[in-house]
Image (cartoon, rainbow, N blue to C red):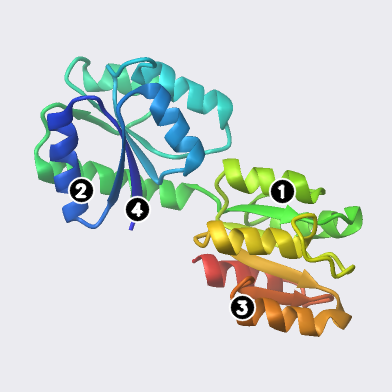
Amino acid sequence: MAHILLVEDDAEVVGYARNVLEAKGFTVEVAGDGEAGLVAYMTRRPDLILLDVFVPRIDGVRFARQLQEKFPGDRVPIVVWTGAYEPESIGDLLATPHVLRKPAASDELVEVVQRALGEETKARALRVLVVSSSVATLRALVEELRAEFDVHPASRWDEALVLVEVRPFEAVVVDVSPDGARDERDGVGILRALHARHRDTARVAVIAPEQHELGSDLKESGTAEVVLTRPWDKGALPQELHAIVG
């Protein structure tokens, strides 16, 4: 079920929202001010933000604008929850059609959250990180995926490890290093780090024909959910990603 970040400093409102949303199966993470909300977002990207306008340290308007500046490619829906503004004016200000006036009945809260999540799911392409130290392989992987996915390439192992820690990806495609090294400087290390710390990120390993034993190890251990041996049929990689990501 969807993960919601609630940016709200009123304990009574927090308790009410948690009770209503968790009863519907949502998970709710609370940030008591805008600065804490930014940290929470960068730690784990939510599926939706439920945002009060008047919160300490960084108010809701500045919070939303900083998200847009720092992560312009992200399209996480924001539901603004306020009693101080007219819905139309605050919606235009924050570029969101999803505005709730406080107080909101429980069925209204759930309906707006579900509608915002439904629209976002239709609009947002799945975010995929593609990792290869080979420029030719990296280019080929990006070309194959970019028509259907929001693709982000990385040519260095250390760069990829940083990216998966600070940015949300639905899937990571890793061209496993053929040298057989088993540390965080190679593709196997990236896959193992993902398997240990980011199990909700789908993992695809790309191996060379002679790496069958390694491919079997990756699948059996759960380190990679899909292992593709070069070369594969055109369209196989997007099809596998859709199958494991949904």
Whichever of labels 3 and 1 marks the residue nearer the N terminus, that label is: 1
Q: CA distance from mark 4 to mark 3?
A: 27 Å
Whichever of labels 4 and 3 marks the residue nearer the N terminus, that label is: 4
The residue positioned 71% from the left and 83% from the top of the image is 216
Viewer-side label of 3, 1: 3
Q: Which residue is mark 2?
A: 21
Q: CA distance from mark 4 to mark 2?
A: 10 Å
Q: Quadrant of residue 137?
A: bottom right
The residue positioned 67% from the left and 43% from the top of the image is 162
Whichever of labels 4 and 2 marks the residue nearer the N terminus, that label is: 4
Q: Which residue is mark 4?
A: 2
Secondary structure of residue under mark 1: helix
Number of other residues with Cα within 10 Å of mark 2, as a class: few under 14, some 14 to 19, many 20 or more? some
- Are discs 4 and 1 less than 8 Å apart at CB? no
Q: CA distance from mark 3 to mark 1?
A: 21 Å
Amino acid on which disc 2 is placed: Leu
Q: Which residue is mark 1?
A: 160
Q: CA distance from mark 4 to mark 1?
A: 26 Å
Q: Position of residue 161 (x, y in %)?
A: 69, 49
